[in-house]
Image (cartoon, helix red, strand yellow):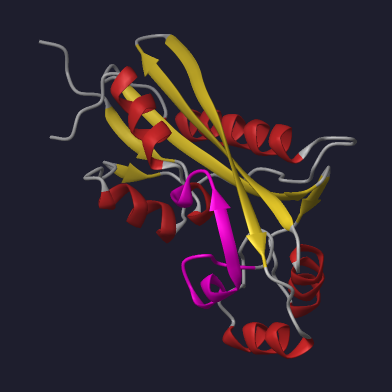
Amino acid sequence: MTARPLLYLASASPRRRALLAQIGIVPDAVAPTNIDETPLSRETPSDHAMRLAREKAAAGLAAIGGGQTPALALAADTVVGVGRRILPKAEDEETARRCLDLISGRSHRVFTGVALASRSGDETRIQDRLVETRVKVRRLSPSDIDDYLASDEWRGKAGGYAIQGLFAKHVISIIGSYSNVVGLPLYETANLLAGAGWRAP
């Protein structure tokens, strides 16, 4: 009987762990990675999300080390794009304000690259999926932005907002996966894991 692969989550994000738990997936361990997330010259938001997910998955698998037990490293990266422009993860109010100004009164796209690096013996491979969701935001007044910045829930979030929080009242519509905007598209993730032979214990 083939051993169930050990599942490592190559992310320290509590949101992604919570999303996985929502569908009954609990990683065997967390193996966060530290890679350079600077966009490449002329890199599109979708290409950026996919490249970082693959690099994080590969780095997560490498960090696990050797061993004969089959192992999987799951990674994801979420990027907010306005046209070809990549919006950063907001770490300060100035950055968050710029992001909110850009998405105010218009549609933007949220891309998440999901990558699963697998190891069985000496063989390593990476499978991936790219998910896109379109989000339309109402026009934000200066006081709307000030109030949201005061909440502090934007900190560290791609595009300067968290759709699962206070910002939800400003969202007119979503076309595509909601969990993708939160940070991990669950349907695609579950299918990647099932295809790699992972099942909940």
Q: Is residue 127 above or below residue 45?
A: above
Q: Is residue 42 left or right of residue 166?
A: right
Q: Tell me the quadrant of the picture where the C terminus can be found.
A: top left
Callout count: 0
Question: Can you give x and y, in whole percent of width and height, for residue 55 in the image?
Answer: 61, 32
Q: Is residue 115 left or right of residue 109?
A: left
Q: Tell me the quadrant of the picture where the N terminus can be found.
A: top left
In this orientation, which residue lies closer to the viewer: 148 or 194? Answer: 148
In this orientation, which residue lies closer to the viewer: 87 or 108? Answer: 108
> Which residue of the protein is positioned furthest toward the right in this rendering?
41
In this orientation, which residue lies closer to the viewer: 53 or 151? Answer: 151
Which residue is pictured at 80% across the width and 42% down the height?
Answer: 39
200 part of magenta stretch: no
Question: Can you give x and y, in whole percent of width and height, for residue 111 in the image?
Answer: 62, 42
Per the rendered image, the range of residues in magenta is 161-179
Which residue is pictured at 76% across the width and 84% down the height?
Answer: 141
Question: Can you give x and y, in whole percent of width and height, for residue 185 in the image?
Answer: 45, 42
Picture quarter containing residue 41? top right
Which residue is pictured at 76% across the width and 69% down the height?
Answer: 104
Picture quarter containing residue 147? bottom right
Q: Is residue 72 left or right of residue 162?
A: left
> Which residue of the protein is positioned furthest toward the left in this rendering?
1
Question: Can you give x and y, in whole percent of width and height, for residue 18 in the image?
Answer: 34, 57
Q: Is residue 175 above or below residue 194?
A: below
Q: Is residue 93 above or below residue 49?
A: below
167 part of magenta stretch: yes
